[in-house]
Image (cartoon, rainbow, N blue to C red):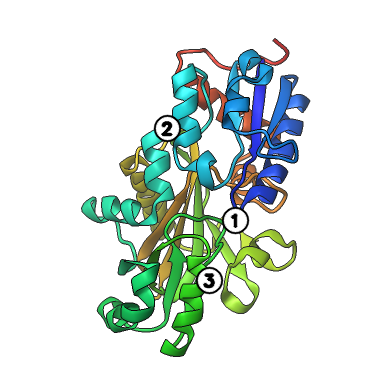
Amino acid sequence: MNILVLMGGTSAEREISLKTGAAVAEALRGGGHDVSTYDLGGAAGRGVMDFVASPELADAAVVFIALHGGEGEDGRIQALLDLVGKPYTGSGVLASALCMDKSFSKMVLERRGIPTPAWFEMSGSAASREAGGKVASIGGYPIVVKPVNQGSTIGISIVGEEGGLEAAIGLARGYSERLIFERYIRGRELSVAIVGEEVFPVIEIVPEDGFYDYERKYTRGKTSYHCPADIDGALSARISREALAAYRALGCEGYARVDLRLGEDGIPYFLEINTIPGMTETSLVPMAAAERGYSFGELVDAIVKEALKKTGDAGPKAGG
């Protein structure tokens, strides 16, 4: 099968996208597929319109979207591929847009009764003047400050006292004028990978110094992972149910990763859903899939098959 891996892009997560795309392309080739890659916004300056007119897209039976953040993950690329009639991996336009926007996704989940940390949104221009006065409404410090529409923990700060608020606002405003202020949940960092509707084992993430930031996420040895997480069976089942409920509530398809904090009160609090999670050597979805018995090649093949289900195709066939 001819598969096009779309990677790169222009977001702050470009370098991780290139790593994801390269790993996925290699695995698909290893499975016997005919694979081409397209670096959107790379050194050649190829933009969306170049992509639409490209022979790589014309020849592709399916597009494996390996873009992270920006237009690749917020529904715009998905809308374009819908218009040209090309099947693609992952969620559709609406789910992609909802999950990329942390405010909207939290509102949907609150309506469904899925726990999420107390929060408020504020524009960057008003935040410096007014955010400090609202922190008590979400339980006081520490809080998390983050841009509304970034991934990979880019632009995020944990603020322990009022004196650190201004710097955190400044950092987040470098990525978005819409900012989220969220109660920090003391407890354990968890993640749940889902492919189709198969929920993989819960992963616990234990970063050095307690903050799973960009460096600790993508630097080998900076974080330890436990899969399956060392939690009792009943709690693990609850976390898996609520992760799948969140995935369904936001209309996700294909595959995604649900990130949570397990509070000291024993409640799993939804943080966000990543609709195009990383597929690098330190990524969580391949780790969880391996625990379930999937090789990396089998995992990417399964993701492609999920994309083709939406078109009625029986599934990808290697080499043709």
Between discs 3 and 1, the one toward the N terminus:
3
Q: Position of residue 168 (x, y in %)?
A: 49, 76
* Residue at the image position 36 percent from the left and 54 percent from the top: 238
Q: Which labelled disc corresponds to residue 227?
A: 1
Compared with residue 103, is residue 160 higher up or lower down, i.e. above or below?
below
- Quadrant for residue 148, please give it: bottom left
Along the line of sight, the residue nearer the viewer: 84 or 255: 84
Q: How many marks?
A: 3
Please tell me how crowded label 3 is: few (under 14), some (14-19), or many (20+) other residues with Cα within 10 Å.
some
Type of amino acid under label 2: Gly
Task: Name the secondary structure under disc 1.
Answer: loop
Whole-angstrom CA distance, mark 3 to mark 1, is: 32 Å
Near-viewer residue (277 or 202)? 277
Mark before the other along the chain sequence, 2 or 1? 2
Work out how far the residue at label 2 is from the one at label 1, CA to CA, in angstroms: 29 Å
In the image, 118: left or right of 256? left
- Badge 3 is on which residue? 171
Q: Amino acid at mark 3?
A: Leu
Specify the quadrant of the image occupied by residue 310. Answer: top left
Does the rendering let one see residue 295? Answer: no
- Residue 72 position within the rendered picture, expressed as x and y whole percent measured from the top left: 54, 39
Number of the label disc, if any, that sits on residue 92: 2
